[in-house]
Amino acid sequence: MKFDPAYKKLMECGIRPSVQRLEIMRYLQTHFTHPTVDEIYMGLKERIPTVSRTTVYNTLRMFSEKNAALMITIDEHRVCYDGNTTPHAHFFCRKCEKIYDLMDIKPSREYCKDIKGFVVEDAQLYYRGVCPNCQKEAEARFVAGEVIN
Amino acid sequence: MKFDPAYKKLMECGIRPSVQRLEIMRYLQTHFTHPTVDEIYMGLKERIPTVSRTTVYNTLRMFSEKNAALMITIDEHRVCYDGNTTPHAHFFCRKCEKIYDLMDIKPSREYCKDIKGFVVEDAQLYYRGVCPNCQKEAEARFVAGEVIN
DNA sequence: ATGGGTGCAAAGGATTTGCAACATT
DNA sequence: AATGTTGCAAATCCTTTGCACCCAT
C-alpha cells in the first residue's frame, strides 16, 4: 500500500485516501491522454460501477486545489486534467485534437525568472499547431494531388 | 471614420462594420482589463441599450476566429477577451485575480522554434502568482505583525 | 426584394449545491 | 457516536441555436 504511487501522491498532498480518490488518482497516473472529467468518469465506472459524476467533479477540483493534479484548459471549454504536476509544456494539434506533453520544455524555471515585481508560482505554456503525425498525412495527401488546408 | 482604430481593425480582419461590432471592438480597444463576455455586454448596454448577450457572444467568437481578438482562458471557466492580438504573455494574480499583460515576453517567437516535427502556429504563455501591488500589501501587513498566506 | 445582422426565447451542456444515506474512525 | 465522504436530484450558470424581425443595399 505504501508503495502504491496513487496512495503516495495523495499522502504527499494531504488528501485522505478514500477508494474513489485512489482510483481517480490511479486513473490519472496511468492515462497520459489528458482526460476530461467525463472520460475519467467513464473509466472509473468499470472499477467502481456506483461512482457518480459529482464525486469525480468534486474530487478533481480538490486535486487541482491541492496540487495533486493539473487542470488545463487548452481547448476552450474542454477542461482536462493532467496527473503530471511537474512543469512541462503542452502542444494541442488542431487536426487530431490531441494534447501532447513536451517534457523538454519547462516553462516555469527558464523563462519566469525576475519578471520585475511579479512573484511567479506557476507557469503554463502551450502551443497550437499541427503534430508530426498529421503533418505526415498532409504531405502524403499533397503528393496524391489533394488540396492542403 | 477611416481613422477610427475600431473601424480599421474590422476592415483589416475582413469583418463588416456594423454598429454592434464597432462598439464591441471599441470596448476591447479601450479596456485593457481582459473583460469577460458579460463585462463587455454590461459595458455595451450603456451605449446600445437594446444589445443582446447573443450578439456579444456571437461577435466575440467571430472576432477570435478571424483573429481580431484573443480568447484567453487563464482562470478556468472564466473565458475572457483581449483586444491586443500581438504576441505577449499574461500574468494572473491569485490575490486580486487581475490579469496583467507582460508585453516584454513574446512566447511565440522565442521559444517555439523547432520543436522537432511539431509545426507551431500559435503559443500562449501565462504565469500565476502574486502581482507587485498585492506583494506590497502583504509586506505591509507583515510589518504590522500579521500572518502571511 | 434580398441578404446579412440582430435579439428574443428556448435549448443544450457542463458544473455545482443541498441533502440524505453511507462508510470509517 | 462523530466525522468525513458519497451520490442522487435539482439548481445554476454559461453558451449556442432556431427563428422571426429589421436594416441596408
Image (tube, coloured by chain):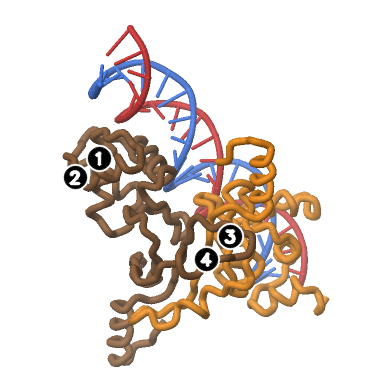
Chain colours: A brown, B orange, C blue, D red
- Quadrant in the picture for residue B148: top right
Chain ID at mark 2? A
The three-letter code of the residue at mark 3 reads: Phe
Residue sitting at 27 percent across and 59 percent down?
A: A32
> Disc 1 and disc 4: Cα gap in Å?
33 Å
The three-letter code of the residue at mark 4 reads: Cys
Chain ID at mark 1? A
Work out whether B81 lies above or below A136. above
- How crowded pointer 2 is (Cα within 10 Å; few <14, some 14-19, many 20+) is rated as few
Verify CB contact (< 8 Å) between mark 1 and mark 4.
Answer: no
Q: Quadrant of the N terminus of chain B?
A: bottom right
Of the pair B9 and A111, the residue shown nearer to us: A111
Mark linked to residue B82:
none
The three-letter code of the residue at mark 2 reads: Asp
> Disc 2 and disc 4: Cα gap in Å?
34 Å
Q: Evaluate whether label 3 is on the same chain as label 4.
A: no
Judged from the image, the secondary structure of the residue bearing numbered disc 4 is: loop
Residue denoted by label 2: A4
The three-letter code of the residue at mark 1 reads: Leu
Q: Earlier in the sequence, mark 2 or mark 4?
A: 2
Tag in front: 2 or 3: 2
- Quadrant in the picture for residue B100: bottom right
Mark linked to residue A22:
1
> Disc 2 and disc 1: Cα gap in Å?
9 Å
Chain ID at mark 4? A
Of the pair B139 and A36, the residue shown nearer to us: B139
Residue denoted by label 4: A112
- How crowded pointer 4 is (Cα within 10 Å; few <14, some 14-19, many 20+) is rated as some
Work out whether A20 lies above or below A114. above
Residue denoted by label 3: B91
